[in-house]
Image (cartoon, rainbow, N blue to C red):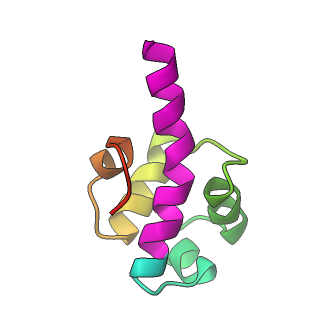
Amino acid sequence: MREILIEEIVSSIGSKISELRKQKDFSLHQLAEKAGVSPTTIHKLERNEMTPTVTILMKIADALGEKVSFFFGRGIR
């Protein structure tokens, strides 16, 4: 049960990043630059091809004006 919840949360991070990026009207490259990560990283995260480290997730959350805890809640705005 707990493993399923963890997987659900991790698999929703990419869509949350994508949704917030679009809400903020950032291009993939703009978010990458603002967060200090590569555009490839953002692309892979949004497509769930990569699981972010805590450091990367913190940088992205900051760039999007969110607390990192946003990515661990259920659902998208």
Which residue sits at x=67%, y=59%?
A: 41
- Residue 7, given in percent of the width and then of the height, sits at 54, 29
56 magenta-colored: no
- Residue 11, given in percent of the width and then of the height, sits at 56, 41
Q: Residue furthest top?
A: 1
Which residue sits at x=49%, y=84%?
A: 26
- Residue 76, given in percent of the width and then of the height, sits at 38, 58
Q: Name the side, left or right, on which 50 lies relative to 19.
A: right
Q: Is the residue 13 above or below the residue 24 in the image?
A: above
- Which SS does the magenta portion mostly show? helix
- Residue 53, given in percent of the width and then of the height, sits at 53, 41
20 magenta-colored: yes
Which residue sits at x=73%, y=65%?
A: 40
Q: Is the residue 11 above or below the residue 17 in the image?
A: above
Q: Is the residue 8 above or below the residue 74 in the image?
A: above
Tell me the quarter of the image containing the C terminus: bottom left
Q: Is the residue 30 above or below the residue 19 in the image?
A: below
Q: Between residues 14 and 54, which one lies in front from this camera angle?
A: 14
Give residue 1's quadrant in the image: top left
Number of numbered discs overlaid on the protein picture:
0
Which residue sits at x=39%, y=70%?
A: 63
Residue stretch in magenta: 1-21
